Image (cartoon, helix red, strand yellow):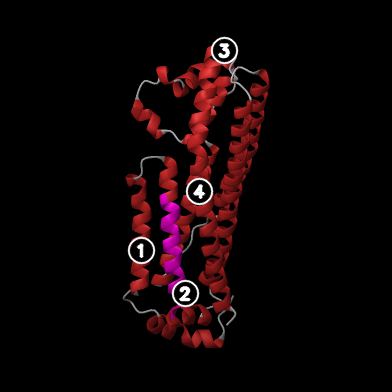
């Protein structure tokens, strides 16, 4: 779309005056938060801890973004160049982030509800009860529904993430980096929810038993690398395995109870972190729209 006469006369002036070559301290602060976000991969001890840390980093990051958007020079740049492609991309990106965050919240909430329901059932039934095995299969089926929804969400992220031209504007470059980093966190969280691809057929028993039964775990370090959801899924597949003995059923049921006890608070923390971040993302989009419509 062609620029208006005002834009044609003012583009160079807006770029050189409203956004100087030296980055604003808030832009530098945003970059520091981005570095902190990347560093969280190497400082956390488990996948859920890493994700909680990343969500906390993103909340601080978007608080900084909100302040950046309140700068007169940032608002002037958006108002003067509202017909430029990069402005439209910022708006589209803010909506895309809201959609991705909503998909992540839905997946986490569904996982939490399924986890609580299974915990309730386990309190009422013994591990060697056939009715309990049916409930386990129902839970695993619900997990498949979640996985399909997550896979659709992940494909949506890939299809909407296009190659964007680099801008000389520090604000634009920083906001695009933040958008990409945020999508990466959502992808990591959704991948965490999906968990491993374990087969429910008897041939998977050797893998399942290695993952689950304490007496068969070869290395404690491997245990800490697996996510809580991965270990719960492995324990449940062990329960419905045709090669599992009654004693194994009881051991696995106890193991599932312990794992669910650890999983539930982690999932709850992720839900709360996503909810806080969702509110931040809404504020960011509203700020962009208010500036654009000014």
Q: Position of residue 31 (x, y in %)?
A: 35, 63
Sequence order check, earlier mark of 4 and 2: 2
Span shown in magenta: 53-71
- Above or below residue 275? Residue 215 is above
C-alpha gap between disc 3 and disc 2 = 62 Å
Mark 1, Cα crowd under 10 Å, few <14 / some 14-19 / many 20+, is some
Question: Predominant secondary structure in magenta?
Answer: helix
Sequence order check, earlier mark of 1 and 4: 1
Left or right placement of residue 190 versus residue 110 in this view: left
The answer to whether marks 4 and 2 mark residues whose Cβ atoms lie closer than 8 Å is: no
> Element at badge 2?
helix
Q: Position of residue 82 (x, y in %)?
A: 55, 77
The answer to whether marks 3 and 4 mark residues whose Cβ atoms lie closer than 8 Å is: no
The circle drawn on residue 270 is 4
User: Quick check: is 271 in the magenta stretch?
Assistant: no
Residue designated by label 1: 31
Residue designated by label 2: 69
């Amino acid at each position: 779309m062609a620029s208006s006469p005002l834009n044609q006369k003012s583009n160079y002036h807006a770029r050189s005056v409203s956004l100087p070559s030296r980055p604003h301290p808030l832009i530098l602060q945003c970059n520091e938060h981005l570095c902190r976000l990347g560093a969280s991969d190497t400082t956390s001890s488990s996948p859920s801890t890493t994700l909680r840390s990343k969500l906390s980093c993103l909340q601080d990051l978007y608080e900084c973004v909100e302040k950046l958007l309140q700068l007169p020079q940032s608002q002037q740049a958006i108002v003067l160049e509202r017909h430029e492609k990069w402005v439209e991309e910022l708006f589209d990106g803010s909506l895309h982030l809201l959609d991705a965050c909503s998909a992540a919240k839905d997946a986490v909430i569904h996982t939490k509800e399924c986890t609580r329901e299974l915990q309730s059932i386990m309190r009422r039934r013994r591990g060697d009860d056939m009715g309990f095995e049916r409930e386990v299969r129902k839970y695993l089926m619900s997990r498949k529904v979640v996985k399909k929804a997550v896979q659709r969400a992940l494909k949506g992220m890939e299809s909407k993430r296009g190659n964007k031209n680099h801008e000389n504007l520090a604000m634009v470059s920083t906001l695009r980096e933040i958008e990409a980093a945020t999508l990466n966190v959502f992808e990591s969280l959704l991948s965490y929810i999906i968990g491993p691809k374990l087969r429910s057929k008897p041939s998977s028993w050797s893998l399942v038993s290695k993952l689950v039964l304490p007496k068969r775990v070869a290395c404690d370090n491997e245990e800490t690398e697996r996510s809580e959801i991965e270990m719960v899924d492995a324990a449940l597949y062990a329960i419905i395995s045709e090669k599992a003995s009654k004693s194994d059923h009881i051991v696995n049921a106890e193991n599932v109870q312990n794992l669910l006890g650890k999983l539930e608070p982690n999932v709850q923390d992720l839900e709360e972190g996503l909810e806080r971040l969702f509110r931040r993302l809404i504020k960011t989009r509203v700020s962009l729209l208010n500036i654009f419509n000014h």
